[in-house]
Amino acid sequence: MNAIELLKADHERVKSILTQLSESTERGLKKRTDLLAKLEMEITLHTKLEEEILYPAFKEAGAKEQDIMYYEAKEEHRTVDSLVLPDLKKTDPGTPEFSGRVKVVKELLEHHIEEEESEMFPQAQKLLGKAKLEELGAQMEAMKTDYKKSLSGMAA
């Protein structure tokens, strides 16, 4: 699977979790807690794949326009990882505040995904080409496997 296909599949998983989370109710505490843990795991891994594999290759292959896109995407990741997700995790899932924060996380991530898929990914396909994207995809799959192993190691 090439890097772009792999990341788009991740995006679909994240959007699905966000939809389930936003449709959950204040009574569904366990469901909300489980979905939030799943969301955090997906986002953490996905961010790692993009920032350590795709983004540097994209930035290196591009020019100033790609530099700007690279830094914007990294800043959006930082906003979610450092501010929005930690706040959501600290919020009681049985409150309307949780619902409000989920809505904001969902809007931010959907905006980010839309920008990547409509701007960055098509440019990455042109700049990097099929062979390079296949190579990056293989690196991503290896990183995913290692990450999941390290998680199961922590759970044991």
Image: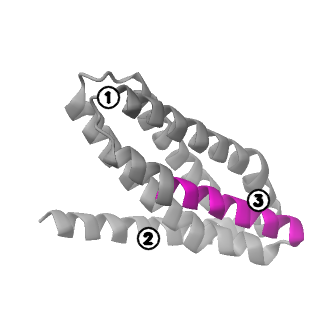
| Residue 89 x %, y % | 34, 48
Q: What is the x, y in percent for residue 76?
A: 62, 55
> How far from the left and from the top, in percent, is residue 70?
72, 65
Nearest to N terminus: mark 3 or mark 2: 3
Mark 2: which amino acid? Met
Answer with left or right where residue 123 lies relative to residue 78.
Answer: right
Q: How many marks?
A: 3
Mark toward the viewer: 1 or 2:
1
Can the viewer see residue 34? yes
Vertical arrangement, residue 57 with respect to residue 32, above or below: below
Mark-to-mark CA distance, 1 and 2: 36 Å
Amino acid type at mark 3: Gln
Which element type, helix, strand or loop, lies under badge 2?
helix
Q: Which residue is mark 1?
A: 95
- The mark nearer the N terminus, 1 or 2, is 1
Q: The residue under label 1 is which amino acid type?
A: Thr
Magenta range is 64-81
**How packed is label 3: few (under 14 Cα within 10 Å), some, or many (20 or more)?**
some
Quadrant where the N terminus is found in the figure = bottom right
| Mark 1–mark 3 CB contact (< 8 Å) | no
Q: Which residue is mark 3?
A: 125
| SS of the residue under disc 1 | loop
Quadrant holding the C terminus: bottom left
* Residue 130 highlighted magenta (yes or no): no
- CA gap between label 3 and label 2 equals 21 Å
Tell me the element at label 3. Answer: helix
Q: Earlier in the sequence, mark 1 or mark 3?
A: 1
Q: Nearer the viewer, residue 56 or 6?
A: 56
Residue 65 located within the stretch drawn in magenta: yes
The residue drawn where x is 48% and y is 49% is 84
Residue at (23% x, 31% y) in the render? 29
Marker disc for residue 143: 2
